[in-house]
Amino acid sequence: MKNKSFRFLWVGQVFANLGDIFYVVGLISLIYALTGSAFYMSLLPFTTTMFRFISNLFAPLVIDRFPLKQILVQSQWLKTLLLILLVCYLFIFEQPMILLISICIALISLLDGVAAPVSSSLTPLLVPKEDWIKANGFLSVLTQGVSLTGWSLGAILLAITDSSFIILLTVILYALSAVCMMHINLAIEKDSEESVQSTRWDSFKSGWVAIYHAPPIRLVIVSDFITSIASGIWIAAVLYVYVEDQLHRGEEWWGYLNTGHFLGMIVGGILTFRFASQLEKHSQTYIIFGLFVDALLTFLFGVTSLPLLSLLITVIHGFPQQIREIAFTKVIQDHATEKMLAKVYSSWNVVINFTFALSVLLLGYITEAYGVKTTFTFASLLIFIAFSLFLVRKNDLVSLPFVRNNDVD
């Protein structure tokens, strides 16, 4: 945890994550100012999700051919360069074209899709194994803390400046992140001849093959797929309806519920950091118990019409969800090799991005057709299915020894 390279990693991630938030705030404001269209504004998350999905699919091809640090640093510098070009374009032309802005968004999303799994895979390379859970909890608290404060700070900056200034500020944050990443000192990465000479198809499928051959990882990915569909209940489209139809309160309660959820996840990360040794010894129990509590709280949240009770449930709900996610990460870190870990994360991100798109459509339809209470009941049922799966297959978590020194073919 005191490793200087790990410190550069998390500081760089803070700069990058804060920059990502400001980048979205600035672009949404810019697009709305140019078009006044909600449809064009919705293209931002759609474009970002789709191109990250595509990039995640092909990330193993890049991971097999370049050192991890090089991928991380160069992708961050390229993102910085693209934003510099965008800022120059905005200052030169009074009426910039939405098409060119969309191309810039797509290219940045492609770079993010490669860099994200690489960044996630570096923690086990920089931190001793006995500190992995602490490190994961610490990084999770930072991520949630940045999310909690970043949007509010971005809104304040937008109110007193403009979108061009915020995008320029993002450039500075991206550049600082790249500088931090440059100071990460990894052990010499082995360029395996087998990896270099492997076909593109072998590289493309390698992460999926690793997941298939490792029952603990496979169990985590399948469970996360199921719970990720359920997590779509927290999107604005569902929560707005919940606040209006179920709680009969104004839209400010949507903000209260989101803030409560983030606070719960931050507290969950702090508890994980504090009691890392307990989670290490009993991770199987914490995962199973966390899924059960998650299902129960989701159901209770969906049926209550008391605003204060719903807010309390939202905060408490963050605890088991955060602890479960950190335990999931630890399972994957335990059962994937150094180079393979980035590919597994890449495949995991494919599942997450695909599931997000599926969840938005599915839960939005259920909410409109059958009501928001049915949506939350359906979500709690999905989480209970994941709980049952873990209960039945819990032995898979200990079915394999650690294999970090041997590649999965």
Image (spheres, rainbow, N blue to C red):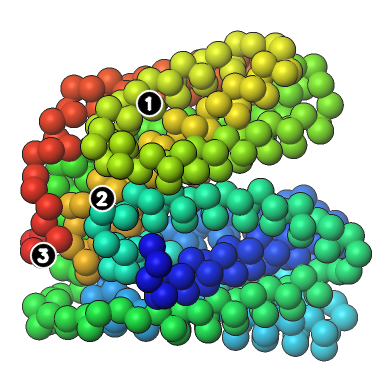
Which quadrant of the structure image shows residue 249? top right
Residue type at mark 3 is Asn
Query: Which quadrant holds the N terminus?
Result: bottom left
Which residue position is annotated with label 3? Answer: 405
Residue furthest to the right: 160
Above/below status of 26 relative to 348: below
- Of the numbered discs in the image, which one, if any, rests on residue 332? 2
Give the residue drawn at x 80%, y 17%.
Answer: 248
**Dot placed on the residue nearer the N-terminal end, 1 or 2:** 1
- Of the numbered discs in the image, which one, if any, rests on residue 291? 1
Which quadrant of the structure image shows residue 286? top left
Label 2: which secondary element: helix
Give the residue drawn at x 69%, y 56%.
Answer: 150
Residue type at mark 1 is Leu
Label 3: which secondary element: loop
Give the residue drawn at x 67%, y 24%.
Answer: 311
Above/below status of 338 relative to 214: below
**Dot placed on the residue nearer the N-terminal end, 3 or 1:** 1
User: Crowding at label 3, few (<14), some or many (≥20) Cα neighbours within 10 Å?
Assistant: few
**Dot placed on the residue nearer the N-terminal end, 3 or 2:** 2
Position in image of residue 141 (x %, y %): 52, 50
Residue type at mark 2 is Ile
User: Crowding at label 1, few (<14), some or many (≥20) Cα neighbours within 10 Å?
Assistant: many
- In the visual, does 230 lie left or right of 186? right
Give the residue drawn at x 76%, y 52%.
Answer: 152
